[in-house]
Image: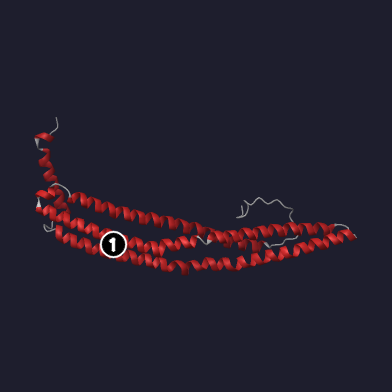
Amino acid sequence: MTIFSGIPFKIGQPKKQIVSKTVERDFEREYEKLQKLEDQTKKLHKDMKKSTEADIAMSKAAVKISADLLGNPLCEQDQAFLESMTALDTAMRRMDSFNQEKVNQIQKTVIDPLKKYSGVFPSLNMAVKRREQALQDYKRLQSKAEKYEEKEKTGPNMVKLHQAREELRPVREDFEAKNKQLLDEMPKFYQSRIDYFQPSFEALIRAQVVYFTEMHKIFSDLTEQIDQGALTDEQRERENEAKLAELRALSIVADD
């Protein structure tokens, strides 16, 4: 199945091959590359939007959790706990602020350019459809001219043959111009993707580097504020298990 097999044209096929198989293969190859590029660009745009939306949801959820912890009644009774939760809340709000900056930067340097790039493809696809329509008109008129060429060389038939050839000439020139333009420009369009997207992807990397550098600073500061006991994860786990065991020993939570 060719890329144009879905177009419902039914015309008489001329005996003369008006477009070589090599040219048609070259055309289809270049256009298929651009179709894949269009699909990949749309998918990347969609995935980048989902990624930034998830980033925003994550940082907002973290701020909500830290605010809820800060409002825990324990903070009213335990000064150390209050200080830890205050430090956590401050860190989460800083994280949210830097995350929003990162998302805004990605929106401007990656998502918006992807959307603009995707917006070029409808015009390209329309140019291909116009080329296909011109090809079908060319075939129809070429077939018509061939029929008169095969008829008896009478005066009326020669007049009709001349008229058919005159009708064919501008249509053939129109198709050849459209075909040449697309064959010249489709490879250039495909190659341009590198120069277009490279700055965007570099900006994406820079935004991520800046963000995670700041996150390292924020959480390093947070660790210094709340990890004064310098317990290891294993020690904290054993301590929690011991406290949980004490809770389970209470009569009010004992199994019946």
Q: Quadrant of residue 154?
A: bottom right
Closer-to-camera residue (116/199)? 116
Residue found 57% across the figure and 65% down from its top: 186
Which residue is label 1 attached to?
A: 98
Residue found 12% across the figure and 41% down from its top: 245
Q: Quadrant of residue 113?
A: bottom left
Say whether residue 146 is left or right of residue 78.
right
In the image, what residue type sits under mark 1? Phe
Residue found 86% across the figure and 57% down from its top: 151
User: Looking at the image, what colour scheme do you see?
Assistant: secondary structure
Query: Disc 1 on helix, strand or loop?
Result: helix
Q: Residue furthest right?
A: 154
Q: Quadrant of the C terminus?
A: top left
Residue found 34% across the figure and 67% down from its top: 206
* Whether residue 27 can be seen here: yes
* Whether residue 232 can be seen here: no
Mark 1: give few (<14), some (14-19) or many (20+) Cα within 10 Å.
some
Say whether residue 62 is left or right of residue 126.
left
Question: Residue 190 at x, y = what percent?
Answer: 53, 65
Please count the marks in the image: 1
Question: Residue 67 at x, y = what percent?
Answer: 21, 51
Question: Residue 42 at x, y = what percent?
Answer: 47, 57
Say whether residue 197 is left or right of residue 182.
left
Question: Residue 18 at x, y = what percent?
Answer: 72, 62
